[in-house]
Amino acid sequence: MQRIAFIMKIKPGSEEEYRRRHQQVWPELLADLKQAGCSRYSIYMRGLELFAYMEVEDFQHYLTVMAASQASEHWEISWSGRLTRLQVFPLCSPKCFISIKQWGGSGEKSRKS
């Protein structure tokens, strides 16, 4: 099992849309996440900052499956211009531990899977 974290930022004014959409994640996107080997995926929101954590069987397999996912492509397009992915790193990376500590670990949680 690999643990992956990434930091994102949403555009000001997109907060309510973000919350609403993550309460109703598309079933086909959830199915593709599962097929890609994602067993857990949590996103924590603090203001405009998002800290995401996922557990996957194999991150390269996950990337391959999700790159071929039409649901993922449509989801990404729907957030185009409103979301910026800032960093992606495995949780075993020293950079991740520093980022988690700096981030503070508080905020509201939206759950994908």
Image (spheres, rainbow, N blue to C red):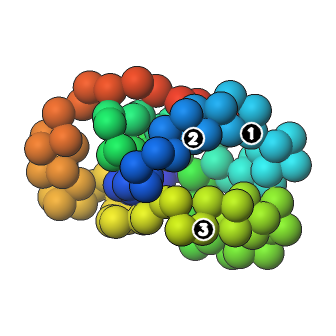
- In the image, which is nearer the foreground, mark 2 or mark 1? 2
Q: CA distance from mark 2 to mark 3?
A: 12 Å
Q: Secondary structure at mark 3?
A: loop
Res 61 visible:
no
Q: Nearer the viewer, residue 48 or 34?
A: 48
Q: CA distance from mark 1 to mark 3?
A: 16 Å
Q: Residues within 10 Å of mark 3 (few under 14, many from 20)?
A: few
Q: Which residue corresponds to the image point at 84% horizontal and 68% vertical from the top-left? A: 70
Q: Which residue corresponds to the image point at 86% horizontal and 41% vertical from the top-left? A: 27
Image quadrant where one finds the C terminus: top right
* Left or right for 38, reference 35: left
Q: Nearer the viewer, residue 49 or 30?
A: 49
Q: Amino acid at mark 3?
A: Ser
Q: Secondary structure at mark 2?
A: helix
Q: Residues within 10 Å of mark 2 (few under 14, many from 20)?
A: some
Q: Which residue corresponds to the image point at 54% horizontal and 68% vertical from the top-left? A: 81
Q: Amino acid at mark 2?
A: Tyr
Quadrant position of residue 40: top right
* Left or right for 110, reference 37: left
User: Which residue lies under the disc numbered 3?
Assistant: 80
- In the image, which is nearer the foreground, mark 1 or mark 3? 3
Instruction: Find residue 22 and report its horizontal and vertical position in percent.
Output: 64, 36
Q: Which mark, by number, is residue 18?
A: 2
Q: Amino acid at mark 1?
A: Val
Is residue 113 placed above or below 48 in the rendered structure? Answer: above
Instruction: Find residue 55 and report its horizontal and vertical position in percent.
Output: 52, 45
Q: Which mark, by number, is residue 25?
A: 1
Q: Secondary structure at mark 1?
A: loop
Give the mark, 1 or 3, whose residue is nearer the N terminus. Answer: 1
Give the mark, 2 or 1, whose residue is nearer the N terminus. Answer: 2
